[in-house]
Amino acid sequence: MITTQNLTFTPTGCDHPVFQDVTLTIRPGERVGIVGPSGAGKTTLGYHLCGAHRLALAGVTTGELRLHGCDGLAGAPPGFAGLVGQNPEAQLFCDTVAEEISLGLRVRNATVAAGDAMVESLLARFDHPFPREAALTSLSLGQKQLTAILSMLAIIPKVLLLDEPTSYLDAPTADRLFAHLDGLCRNEGWIVLVIEHDVRRLAAFADRFLRLEHGRLCYDGPPRSFPSQVPLGRPTPRTDSTPPQQAAPAVRFVDIGYGYGKQNPVLHDINLSLAPGEVVALVGHNGAGKSTLLRLAKGLGKPATGRVELAPGLTAKRHVGFMMQNPDAQIFAHTVEVECGYWPTNLGMPAEQRKARVHTALTALGLEEKLTRSPFSLSFGEKRRLCMAAVLVADPAILCLDEPTTGLDDATMARLAAIVRMEAATGKAVLLATHDADFAAATATRIVRLEGGRIVSETPNREPRP
Amino acid sequence: MIAALRRASAVSKFAFALSVCAYAFTCEDWRVLVGLIVFLAGLILVSKQWDRSVTLIFGAFFLGLPTLLLLFILGGVEKAGSWKEGTLLALSWLALFSLRLFVFLFVDVLVVKWTTFSNMLLSLRALGLPSKAVLFASTMVGLVPRVFALGLHVVEVQGCRGLEAKKLARPRNLLALFVPVFLIQMRRATDLALSLELRGIAADATGQGPALSPGIGDVLFGLAAVLVWAGPLWSLIRS
Amino acid sequence: MQILRPKDLSTAQVVFFASVVALDFAWGLVFKTALQLTFIHEVARLEMVVSVMLMVLVRLMLDRFGTLIVFELAWGLLAAVLMPAAGGQPGFMKLVPALTQGIVFDLLFSLLARPWPLGRAYVAILVGGILGPCAAMTVRVAMGLPWATASQTFFGISLLTSLVINGFGVYLAILVWKRIQNLDVVAMLRLT
């Protein structure tokens, strides 16, 4: 059981708490969804509820926190909680899948046989998605996320916290995961806390929602009573999905074959073209080759077979804008304005023109008031928008967006979808890789499904989703 | 015999390496140095540890040889006063320098190839070093390829925004690589530490590892570390 | 009330520290080796800019005596194991200049902490950056490198360029520090 009384947390160096006066009780077997906009304090609260706050946060916690009857303010004992964060790749320590999953057991002096049995049983639950001796470096992000989750399941914690567990997982794997967790809660009394932006998916699993907004717990109850008037702001499905004029393609993939090394083929016989003004959404399971195709469009890798053709006058370096998944991999400047203007600066754009472009791009993404702020102080959603602005500022003819909605709340997603449609309307060709079916429906003119590195279907997006 | 030597603890091997390196500094006799090199190279070959990485190590040395040669020749000519004599003198110095360098490299390769990582960690624990030292060592080694990959990834990301190698001299571009790598590594460190702590691996765990029990290999390495000084000691006694 | 910071290194600090050494080593593995193949390395150790940045930042974050000694020792051992022929010092001889630098860095960082909280980085790195190469040259001369005019000239030039390169590295490190010192992740890892 987890109980809190007026729990408040203020980070070091901050004058206001991230969350305050949170009072709740969570009983064994409960499946709790923690929802709310970006920056609301969901992750911070989650860390406290599983007793990991002292290990993960710097700040002051006041109020009362009891974990299974013991004082939880000093933290929880090892083995009490398992946690998989937003960046599962960072949590991996070993060389192979089997070593990673069994690490927690080996530390407790479990026998090799016991460790092997646990690895086998967990992988079997997910239909052996990858070999047990697979090197972790060879896995896709989604596979790494699954490995991180399995490594926490292996230690059989009393409380499990999953922060955006489906951000990189495909739908079938996510479904299996939630089904397994459901069984653990009902049969073993586990408490499972899931932080998730996809409220609909979460509602199918959780029996209780906690909603945080502006640091306060504003809802604590069953999903069915979750107030529908809370504006989720899901992207409006396209109703004007008439394909653009059949202009010459901005980019064409011709007989593309590609692999990371000879033993790891990723793409086979890909033939795909995008016209200016088109938005093509690449959908498919983890490891299907979606991100790889985007990378080839940007020239980050040479196809083993086939070729990537850009429209005459276009170059990958100048005219293809690529927005990657992790904003931390690019942010470095001392102000938002300088960060956004980095690409035009490298292109040698005159200062006046660059300044104007930066202002336009930041305004379109709703960051016009943060020009002089340090980009490190932005929330995750704001950083993603900054990254988008930093790509749009150079006015590329082709936009490649790799999982643009990861970690974003509904409002930001809706804004992003509007921007994608707007950019396509100006004549840009947009190629995006996404797990989010709603986002694909709201933005794409065409949806291309990849499976095993091949295109298995290519359909115009005519039917608006309900 | 080779197997016994390989099973020796990392501590014995390291002590042997230090002793041989120290001896190589004092030894002026090229025959002794050649003998040492042949002996060490023989051990590596017999234990089947001579692979491409060993060849590459020596390749790196030879690629840096022209610069060394220049320094030696200029020094030799300055000492001797003529180019011919100076060059001959320089080559003799270079020969001695290179022999010493090969001794250092061979003994280094021998220790590295014959010491597994877990063996090294066990030795550290047996010496009473705290768990955090063991965690530090294992994390550091494990992370080298990952930070390398992270660095390459950031180079790629910033390359998509126009960063080019030739522009790296500018502070802005150096920071464009450095800052993201450093920050991501900080966040990864906290995430990884959290994951390890939750699974029971903590830096403040107490307790010493199993004590080292010296085997034949340890004795042999200890003897070798002492015997290598037998020649100079004998000369010292006689004089 | 949550206790803010234990005095010993936490797991996160140990992992962070190890990752910075790994980062410095990975950087050196590529650039030090590549530059060593050129004449430039004899007179200008360009790769030191990033190494200096990492050392200054890690010392500012884990601000106590011993940090840079451990850093240099760990780096030296990694280099001895994984790139024994690079950098001009063969094998375990790399430990000599590495430890010399580490001790000088840590001494000066600790001694000057009160009067010059940030400026001490310049003093420590510049002084250590002179004494370290001196130790390295001592090893090379002991190995048989002639201490003649040519060697002295190149060594002198390399010391001068060291001052410039190391000073630049400290400048950039302080620039980065000012940007990141208030971040939550830095607060989590900082040992003061």
Image: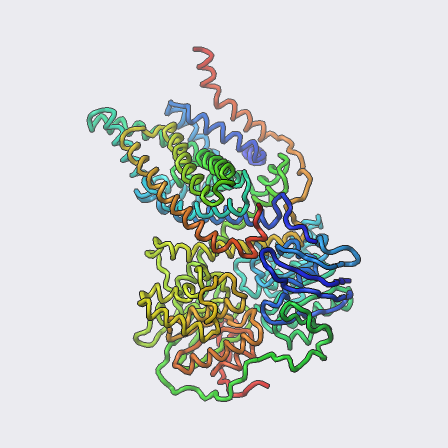
Is residue B46 visible in the rendered image? The answer is no
Is the residue B22 above or below the residue B124 in the image?
Answer: above
| Quarter residue A216 falls in | bottom right
Is the residue B85 above or below the residue C81 in the image?
Answer: above
Q: Viewer-proximal residue, B71 or A451?
A: B71
Relative placement, left or right, of C38 versus B12 is left
| Quarter residue C41 falls in | top left
Residue under the point 42% across and 77% down: A271
Q: Viewer-proximal residue, C77 or A137?
A: C77
Q: How many marks?
A: 0
Q: How far from the left and from the top, in percent, is residue A435?
A: 55, 73
Residue under the point 32% across and 56% down: B166
Query: Can you say which quadrant of the picture contains the C terminus of chain A?
Result: bottom right
Q: Viewer-proximal residue, A351 or C98?
A: A351
Relative placement, left or right, of C188 versus A157 is left
Q: How far from the left and from the top, in percent, is residue A154?
A: 69, 58
Residue under the point 34% across and 63% down: A346
User: Most extreme residue toward the top, as rendered?
Assistant: B239
| Quarter residue A330 falls in | bottom left
Q: How far from the left and from the top, in percent, is residue A402?
A: 48, 70
Q: Viewer-proximal residue, C56 or B22?
A: C56
Is the residue B121 above or below the residue A314 in the image?
Answer: above
Is the residue C46 above or below the residue A333 in the image?
Answer: above
Query: Can you say which quadrant of the picture contains the N terminus of chain A?
Result: bottom right
Is residue B159 visible in the rendered image? The answer is yes
